[in-house]
Image (cartoon, coloured by chain):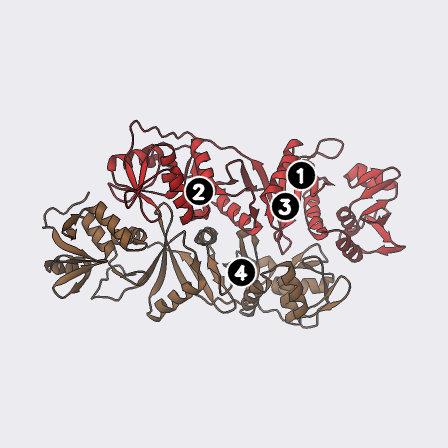
Chain colours: A red, B brown
C-alpha cells in the first residue's frame, strides 16, 4: 500500500457519520488537497473521504476510544451509511483520476480539471447508484432539473456487481430536421391489413416514399406502411384508410385498433408525431432494439446516409432497468448514434462519458 | 411490373386456402421452377406462392367465378390465412434471393443454394414471425428439437413493423474452456457487505484474482467479489463468508440473502456455476447489457484478451421480447462475440444470418 510515511499521521474521531480531524488537517488536507470541510477548529471528513485517507495512511481514526484500521473503519461505515461501498468505489475512482470532490445530496459535486473548491464552481453532479437499483424517469427528471438550475452537468455513475463503474452524462435535447411532406393533391386510399397498411396506388406510393421516406415498397407498385406511419398520415389528412371490409377509419378508430395490436402504440405515437413535426424522419429501430432510428437530413431515399439518433419512447412513469439502459447506450454508441429517451413532453440524451 | 408475356398465363381456382392450377402448370411451374406440389391432374399452390405468381403475371386465379387481381387476391388471402402478410413478405424475399421453397408447418422449408425438391433435402426450416409476437423459450426449444431431429437448421425470420426482415440462426451449443482454480490451501474469510463481498487478506485476494479471475481489486490488498462469485467460491469450499456481525454463512444462507438483493439470483447462479464447471470464466456483462461476458482461454489477468461470449440467463418459462433479442444479438455481433441464452439445462446461440 502507498503510505506517506514522511508526514505525521493526523488524528480524528468518528462521530456518527462524519470524522472530525484535529486542526492542523485544515492546512495539510484541506488547503493543499481539498479534502473535507473546515468546521471551526476541526476538519470534517465524510465517510468515503475518511476511508480513503486511512487507506492512504494520512489519518488515524478512533471510535469509542479504539483505533479503527481500514477493515474495521470500512465495516463500520458500511453499517451506518447506506450505499457506502458504492460511494467509496466512485469516490476513490474520481479522486484517483485527479478530480477534487465534495459530498453532495445523492453523490458528489465534482470540480472541473484544474479547478477546486474556493477557486471554481463545481462542474458535475455525480449521482451514484448500483446496476441493481431501478431508476425512475421521474427521479431522473428531478435530478436533472436541480442540476440544470445550478448550471451544472448531470453524471450518472453506475457501479456494476463487480464494482466496475460506468459514467453516463444525461442532458435534455430538442432535435430537429429538415423534412417536410407537402403533397399537392389529396392522396388515395390505403387498406389496413392484419398489422400494417398497404397503399395500392403507385403514384401515392411514390409521393410518400420519395417525399417523406414513409413506408417500404413491397414491389414496384405497392407500398407497405407501418401502423404508426399510417396513423400519422391519416391524422395529417394526407391519406385515407379503410379496413378490408371497406369500412373507413378516422384517427380515433385507427389508433384504437392499433392499440389493440400493440399496447404501447400511443406512447410510441406521441414521440413519432413530435419527431415528424420537428422535421425529422423516424423509421423503425427494430434492428437496434429501440423504437426508432431517426434521420436528421432527409432529402431522397437514394441519398440517405446513416441515421443520427436512436429514440426510445417511454411513459412518464417509466422505470429504467440500468442493464437495459447500458445495452441501449452501448449499442447506440457502437453505431455512432445518440441514444435518446423521450415522450410527448421531453427528450433526454444519455451518453457514455469518459471522465 | 415484371410480366412474362411470352408464356401463356395459367389458370387456377382458389379453393379454401390453396389454389389449384391446370395440369400444364406441373411442367411449367413445378418441373422448371419448383413452385407448388403436383396433386394428380393439378398443381397445388399455397397462398404466398399464388400471390407471388399473380404478381409475376404467370397465373390467373378465380374465386366464385370472378378473377382476382393482385390486390383482391392479397386482401382475400390476408382474410383467410393468419399472418399471410408476414409469410408473403418472407416468401418473396427468399424466392428473390434465389432459394427454392416449400411450405412448412410454421413457415417454410428452404433448399440449399443449387438444390431443389427431388434433388436434395431441404436445409433450413424458416420460422416466420413478427417483431410484435413474444417468443416463448419453450416454443423455441420445441422447434429446435423438431428441426434438429430432421438434421436441418433452424432460421427465425422476424418481420419488423416496416416489413424489413431479419434472419437469425438458432443452435444449441455447449461451450467449454480451460480455467480451473485449484487452491492448494484453505482460503480465508470474506465479509458480506451490502451487496458484495470483501476479501481482506492480500494472499487470498491474489490467488483468487490470478488463479481464476475472481473479483476486482479495490486496491493493492483488498479484493471485491460479486455475490455470484462469492456464492460459487463458498459452495466449492474455496472461501468462507461471514456477515458484518461475524455470523458465518453456508451456501443455503448465502443464496437466500443474495436472492433478497437480486430476485433472479438463482437463475443467474445456475448458469454461472455451469460455465465455471466447464472451465469458462464468466464476468459481469453489465457494460453489454447481459448477465455475463465469458472468457474461453483464461491464463492470467495480464494476458487477458477480449471475451468470447455474451451469456444471458433465462428461466425455462422465459418469453423473449424480439426487440430485446434483436438488440442483444446486434450488440454481441458488433463486438464480435456470440450471443448465448441459457439456463442450467441448455445453451442456445442466436446469431444474425446473412442468407
Separation of marks 3 and 1 at Cα, in angstroms: 10 Å
Q: Position of residue A100 (x, y in %)?
A: 72, 39
- Does B64 sit above or below residue A142? below
Secondary structure beneath disc 2? strand
Q: Are marks 4 and 1 in contact (CB under 8 Å)?
A: no
Please report, as a chain letter, where disc 3 is located.
A
Q: Please state which of the two labelled residues, at mark 3 or mark 4, is closer to the viewer.
A: 3
Q: Which residue is mark 2?
A: A292
Residue positioned 71% across, 34% down in the render: A115
Separation of marks 2 and 3 at Cα, in angstroms: 26 Å
Q: Which residue is mark 1?
A: A125
Dot 3 alpha-carbon crowd within 10 angstroms: few under 14, some 14 to 19, many 20 or more: many
N-term mark: 3 or 1: 1
Residue positioned 36% across, 37% down in the render: A250
Q: Position of residue B45 (x, y in %)?
A: 20, 58
Residue positioned 41% across, 64% down in the render: B139
Q: Which residue is mark 3?
A: A157
Separation of marks 2 and 1 at Cα, in angstroms: 30 Å
Left or right relative to B346: residue B101? left
Q: Position of residue B175 (x, y in %)?
A: 48, 66
The numbered dot on residue A88 is: none
Please report, as a chain letter, where disc 2 is located.
A
Q: Please state which of the two labelled residues, at mark 4 or mark 2, is closer to the viewer.
A: 2
The numbered dot on residue B294 is: 4
* Residue A336 seen in the figure: no
* Residue A113 seen in the figure: yes
Amino acid at each position: 500500500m502507498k503510505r506517506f510515511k514522511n508526514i505525521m499521521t493526523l488524528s480524528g474521531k468518528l462521530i456518527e457519520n462524519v470524522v472530525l480531524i484535529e486542526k492542523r488537517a485544515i492546512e495539510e488536507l484541506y488547503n493543499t488537497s481539498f479534502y473535507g470541510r473546515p468546521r471551526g477548529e476541526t476538519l470534517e471528513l465524510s465517510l468515503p473521504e475518511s476511508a480513503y485517507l486511512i487507506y492512504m495512511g494520512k489519518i488515524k481514526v478512533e471510535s469509542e476510544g479504539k483505533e479503527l484500521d481500514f477493515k474495521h473503519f470500512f465495516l463500520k461505515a458500511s453499517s451506518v451509511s447506506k450505499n457506502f461501498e458504492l460511494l467509496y468505489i466512485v469516490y476513490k475512482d474520481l479522486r484517483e483520476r485527479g478530480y477534487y470532490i465534495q459530498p453532495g445530496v445523492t453523490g458528489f459535486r465534482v470540480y472541473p480539471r484544474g479547478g477546486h473548491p474556493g477557486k471554481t464552481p463545481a462542474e458535475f453532479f455525480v449521482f451514484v447508484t448500483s446496476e441493481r437499483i431501478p431508476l425512475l424517469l421521474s427521479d431522473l427528471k428531478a435530478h436533472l432539473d436541480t442540476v440544470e438550475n445550478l448550471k451544472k452537468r448531470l453524471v450518472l455513475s453506475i457501479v456494476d456487481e463487480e464494482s466496475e463503474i460506468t459514467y453516463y452524462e444525461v442532458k435534455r435535447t430538442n432535435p430537429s430536421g429538415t423534412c417536410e411532406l407537402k403533397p399537392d393533391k389529396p392522396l388515395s386510399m390505403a387498406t389496413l391489413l392484419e398489422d400494417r397498411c398497404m397503399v395500392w396506388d403507385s403514384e401515392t406510393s411514390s409521393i410518400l416514399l420519395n417525399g417523406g421516406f414513409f413506408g417500404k415498397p413491397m414491389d414496384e407498385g405497392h407500398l407497405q406502411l407501418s401502423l404508426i406511419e399510417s396513423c400519422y398520415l391519416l391524422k395529417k389528412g394526407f391519406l385515407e384508410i379503410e379496413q378490408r371490409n371497406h369500412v373507413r377509419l378516422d384517427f380515433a378508430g385507427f389508433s384504437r385498433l392499433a392499440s389493440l395490436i400493440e399496447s404501447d402504440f400511443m406512447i410510441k405515437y406521441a414521440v413519432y408525431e413530435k419527431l415528424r413535426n420537428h422535421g425529422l424522419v423516424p423509421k423503425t429501430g427494430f434492428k437496434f432494439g429501440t423504437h426508432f432510428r431517426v434521420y436528421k437530413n432527409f432529402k431522397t431515399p437514394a441519398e440517405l446516409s446513416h441515421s443520427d439518433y436512436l429514440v426510445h419512447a417511454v411513459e412518464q412513469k417509466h422505470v429504467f432497468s440500468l442493464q437495459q439502459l447500458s445495452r441501449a447506450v452501448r449499442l447506440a454508441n457502437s453505431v455512432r448514434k445518440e441514444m435518446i429517451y423521450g415522450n410527448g413532453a421531453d427528450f433526454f440524451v444519455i451518453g457514455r462519458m469518459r471522465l
